[in-house]
């Protein structure tokens, strides 16, 4: 009923009952342009003929903008970091010293911090994210499914700065008072949990990142799982498998490339995440083996020091860190997209074909 | 019947796996619940009329608020939407209607790559493009940074929605002799409008909470500012600044600001969800 305003019904109605709609639209205005051409063509004049190509060009310009933006990003990053690129060369990524006063810059502590915090995050987020996705896609009753996927969506919509705020006042005290002493007591022998429990540090950053990355991993994994053909499940069940065996053999095994892609996309997000990490990692440019010690990441050094950087070399070194971060995330994301695409590619095609 | 033959160990394993999955989803939802609880508890008690309408007070004075930051966020988001929405829709139309070729694929891939660029890097780029040329921080620079983040999301969402419109609808319009651009604007885009608006609102919700790209573009401001070429306060920036400060009064305000921000974002997401559940296409139900 309410859909009767749609183009499709309107057209069919028009052809079925010609008398009712024999208005101005259905009568050809004695064609001076001849035969097959257009009843409704807005104008056959100069403007009318140009409007189609003009529209196409305008849309293409919008499409081109996307490419131009990427080119601008690369240009800005390369041009603004050339001072530092020239001065330090590859040594920039191997040097541990970050001394703005003396003008000595090396990015190693930040690279280390970014990698370690992201790996801690993945170690926590992968089992949880995949487990949650398996539950939503395979186990939970249909009525719960909508609510659960909405809540995980919500988790992804919370801004980074709010995660950071929550982490400073809730998570960090929790880690300092309970989790870190416990880890130091029982897992101190791994030498990963040494030193005083500040609360703030690499571990806190990893935990916040994990919370932020879980929704991405779980929603993408869910998409991949639902893309596995139904027959796979039915075939395994028909062989007498339990539900878990069906999930393991029929679903997870078929979807593993896509799940890996989801995990790597999560990694891409973790690598570039700025605010929440900056607020809890402690911001000290040192490489410490212990996860309880403060660290620094590539994104957070830019966030903290960019607007206060004095001198062109300092600024240029920060932009170079940005350039490195950009390149790494592009490679990571491109690889992940490819993996997800190999699993889900059949699905959108089917949607479009109908 | 066949259930009987499944061995004890396999049954236990099955139940164990279910238990693990349930545990995983609970652990995933726990932080969400905790964050909302704390936001409510700490935020609600600090929100009042002064908070929503006044500018920040100096350290030590009680009171004041984030009125200027809320307004500033509005200005920056308006600029971002003005640039990002038309360009994003245009790019989406191009991809769906003209982009079924290699060039379209290249743009599609570029949009996906842009989607993954860390927001802090976009901040650097907007700094170079706008702030560096203008010689000072501005609302305009912040808006440009956020629009760069909106464009790829909106264009991919638009494309997806346009592809859902059946080809027969386009053919019907073209068969009536309506020109191609008119078909796209009045028929295809209109049919997909609800879905496209959903995509726009999601993109909006995503950039509304962005902080990193504003750090050295909009920069922040302690006072009211309506000039587009001057440093401007933004809600996420203010939350960040107050959260890392050592003052209890400012912490209180940070929670209140966070509550305002999250209410804004969640209501956008919820509206989207309701619209989406009614069907993204006007025609398909």
Image: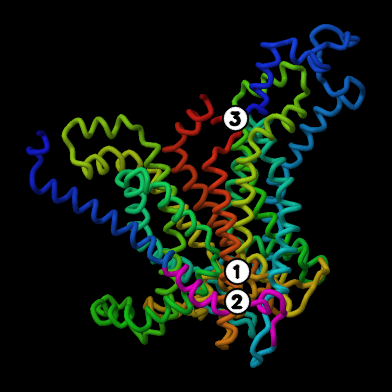
Could you say which quadrant of the image residue A244 lies in? top left
Are both tags, 2 and 3, on one chain?
yes
Could you say which quadrant of the image residue B177 lies in? top right
- The residue carrying pointer 2 sits among few (fewer than 14), some (14 to 19) or many (20 or more) residues within 10 Å by Cα, namely some
Q: Where is residue B147 in the image (x, y as percent from the top left)?
A: 70, 55
Could you say which quadrant of the image residue A242 lies in? top left
Q: Which is nearer the eye, A225 or B182?
A: B182
- The residue identified by callout 3 is B283
Q: Which residue occupies the extreme bottom position in the image?
A: B60
Q: Which chain carries label 3?
A: B
Which mark identifies residue B47?
A: 2
Whether residue B210 is situated above or below residue A287 in the rendered picture: above
**SS under mark 1:** helix
- The residue carrying pointer 3 sits among few (fewer than 14), some (14 to 19) or many (20 or more) residues within 10 Å by Cα, namely some
Which mark identifies residue B260?
A: 1
- Which residue: 54% across, 53% down? B270
Q: Which is nearer the eye, A20 or B218?
A: A20
- Which residue: 39% across, 61% down? B29
Q: Which chain carries label 2?
A: B
- Which residue: 62% across, 34% down? B162
Picture colour scheme: rainbow
The magenta-colored residue range is B34-57
**SS under mark 2:** loop
- Which residue: 77% across, 68% down? B138
Q: Do the residues labelled 1 and 2 touch (CB within 8 Å)?
A: yes
**CA gap, disc 2 to disc 3?**
44 Å
Position of A218 compared to A241: left or right?
A: right
């Amino acid at each position: 009923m309410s859909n009767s305003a749609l183009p499709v019904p309107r057209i069919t109605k028009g052809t079925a009952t010609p008398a009712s709609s024999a208005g101005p639209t259905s009568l050809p205005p004695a064609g001076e342009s001849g035969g097959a051409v257009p009843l409704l063509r807005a104008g056959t004049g100069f403007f009318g003929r140009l409007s189609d190509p003009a529209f196409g060009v305008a849309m293409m310009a919008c499409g081109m903008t996307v490419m131009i933006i990427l080119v601008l990003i690369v240009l800005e990053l390369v041009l603004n970091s050339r001072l530092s690129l020239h001065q330090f060369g590859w040594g920039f990524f191997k040097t541990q010293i970050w001394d703005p006063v003396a003008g000595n810059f090396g990015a190693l502590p930040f690279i280390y911090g970014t990698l370690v915090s992201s790996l801690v995050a993945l170690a926590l987020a992968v089992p949880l994210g995949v487990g949650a996705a398996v539950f939503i896609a395979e186990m939970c009753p249909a009525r719960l499914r909508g609510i659960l996927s909405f809540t995980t969506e919500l988790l992804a919509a919370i801004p980074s700065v709010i995660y950071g705020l929550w982490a400073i006042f809730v998570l960090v005290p929790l880690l300092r008072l309970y989790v870190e002493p416990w880890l130091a007591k029982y897992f101190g022998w791994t030498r990963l949990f040494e030193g005083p429990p500040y609360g703030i540090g690499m571990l806190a950053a990893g935990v916040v990142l994990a919370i932020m990355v879980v929704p991405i991993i779980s929603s993408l994994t869910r998409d991949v799982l639902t893309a596995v053909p139904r027959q796979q499940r039915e075939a395994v069940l028909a062989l007498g498998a339990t539900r878990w065996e069906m999930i393991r053999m029929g679903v997870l095994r078929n979807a593993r490339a896509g799940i890996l892609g989801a995990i790597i996309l999560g990694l891409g997000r973790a690598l570039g995440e700025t605010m929440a990490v900056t607020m809890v990692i402690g911001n000290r440019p040192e490489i410490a083996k212990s996860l309880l010690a403060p660290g620094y990441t590539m994104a957070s050094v830019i966030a903290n020091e960019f607007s206060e950087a004095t001198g062109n070399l300092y600024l240029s070194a920060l932009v170079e860190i940005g350039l490195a971060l950009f390149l790494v995330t592009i490679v990571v994301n491109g690889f992940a997209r490819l993996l997800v695409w190999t699993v889900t590619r059949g699905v959108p095609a089917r949607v479009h074909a109908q | 019947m066949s259930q009987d033959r499944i061995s004890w160990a396999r049954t236990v394993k099955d139940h164990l796996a279910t238990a693990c999955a349930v545990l995983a989803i609970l652990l995933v939802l726990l932080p969400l619940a905790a964050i909302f609880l704390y936001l409510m508890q700490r935020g609600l008690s600090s929100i009042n009329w002064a908070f929503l309408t006044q500018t920040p007070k100096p350290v030590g004075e009680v009171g004041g608020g984030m009125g200027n930051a809320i307004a500033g966020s509005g200005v920056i988001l308006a600029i971002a939407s003005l640039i990002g929405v038309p360009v994003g829709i245009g790019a989406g139309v191009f991809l769906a209607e003209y982009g079924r070729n290699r060039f379209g694929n290249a743009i599609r891939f570029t949009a996906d790559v842009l989607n993954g660029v860390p927001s802090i890097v976009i901040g650097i780029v907007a700094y170079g493009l706008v702030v560096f040329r203008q010689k000072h921080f501005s609302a305009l620079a912040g808006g440009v940074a956020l629009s760069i983040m909106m464009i790829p999301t909106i264009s991919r969402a638009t494309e997806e929605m346009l592809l859902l419109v059946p080809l027969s609808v386009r053919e019907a319009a073209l068969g009536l002799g309506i020109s191609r651009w008119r078909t796209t604007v009045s028929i295809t885009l209109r049919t997909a409008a609800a879905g496209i608006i959903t995509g726009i609102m999601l993109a909006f919700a995503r950039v509304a909470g962005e902080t990193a790209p504003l750090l050295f573009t909009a920069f922040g401001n302690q006072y009211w500012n309506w000039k587009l070429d001057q440093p401007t306060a933004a809600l996420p920036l203010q939350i960040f600044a107050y959260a890392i400060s050592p003052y209890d009064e400012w912490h209180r305000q940070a929670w209140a600001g966070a509550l305002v921000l999250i209410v804004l974002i969640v209501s956008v997401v919820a509206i989207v969800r309701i619209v989406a559940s009614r069907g993204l296409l006007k025609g398909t139900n």
